[in-house]
Amino acid sequence: MPPIDTPIDTPRRSGVILVAPVAAATALFAGGLGARDALGNSVPASDTAGLVVLGRIQTDVDNSAGAAGDLSANFEAGVFRYANSAGTPLTNADVGHAGFVEDDETVSGNPGNNGIVAGLVVEVDADGVWIDTRYAAILQRNEGISVAVVDNADGTATATIRSRSGRTLLRVWLADTAYGAVDAAETSVAATTGSVITSHTAHGDLECLSDADGDLVLTITAADGALHVNAAAGAATATGTAAITGN
């Protein structure tokens, strides 16, 4: 169409209420945190790959006996308070950063396995975490990372670090505790997916680049005992651990 040269009455929405079809065999409950899946259907928010948070579910919708799209649901985008994770709680130090979905009523400081962003952390108080869900989709692309560590029972571990942003520059450091001081005791680190650009403090502090899909896979040779693999990309952080055996 050509550019306009007279005023037009453009249809508008507030952007506060979002509408999405409900996934097959799914029930949504008012007040819970809702998300859309990779097919664009709405589900309760969870640490499940491919989800993007929409906001607070406005009313109960029971599509447990229906096919995808038989029913639709409304989601309100805004600032809401949800429970803080008992295992990996958010603190005031996380204000201004991403909070991650633990389940549809709990927000965590740990991205879990899939880095599903609940929203921007606005405030942390004694009753929970206030999050702004309007930032969830943007932060999902820019901040979601996760770390999983598996003991190979031969004196090595495989660390898989995933970024939601595609190819990503990552700082990775090895420690005795989650987010602890760098431990230089590891004898070698090699990338099987992505690459190690620079090693500092022997092999304990690394600058790495994930592949085009956002994956970085490291093989780490270490002494028996607890190994924590910590990662940071921009404002996002994640940690994973395994007990090394086999030496």
Image: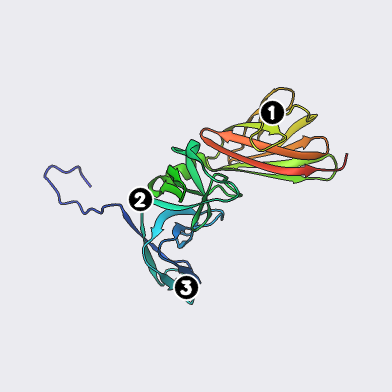
Quickly name the residue at label 3.
67
Which residue is the extreme one toward the top? 201
Q: Earlier in the sequence, mark 2 or mark 1?
A: 2
Distance CA(mark 1)–CA(mark 3): 51 Å
- Which image quarter: residue 181? top right
Quickly name the residue at label 2.
78
- Please, is residue 165 above or below residue 13 in the view? above
- Which image quarter: residue 95? top left
The answer to the question of whether label 3 and label 2 lie on touching residues, with beta carbons closer than 8 A, is: no
- Please, is residue 180 above or below residue 131 in the view? above
Q: Earlier in the sequence, mark 3 or mark 2?
A: 3
Distance CA(mark 3)–CA(mark 2): 29 Å
* Residue occupying image coordinates x 61% and y 37%: 211
Question: Residue 170, percent across and down?
Answer: 60, 32
Which residue is the extreme one toward the front? 126
* Residue occupying image coordinates x 35% and y 50%: 78
Q: Amino acid at mark 1?
A: Val
In-image side of 190 versus 208 (left or right): right
Distance CA(mark 2)–CA(mark 1): 39 Å
Quickly name the residue at label 1.
182
Q: Amino acid at mark 3?
A: Ala
* Residue occupying image coordinates x 57% and y 51%: 86
Residue 206 makes an appearance in the image: yes
Residue 193 makes an appearance in the image: no
- Please, is residue 110 above or below residue 64 in the view? above
Tell me if mark 2 has few (under 14), some (14-19) or many (20+) residues whose alpha carbon lies within 10 angstroms of its own: some
Q: Amino acid at mark 2?
A: Gly
Question: Residue 96, percent across and down?
Answer: 44, 37
- Which image quarter: residue 239? top right
**Which SS class for mark 2?**
loop
In-image side of 106 versus 153 (left or right): left
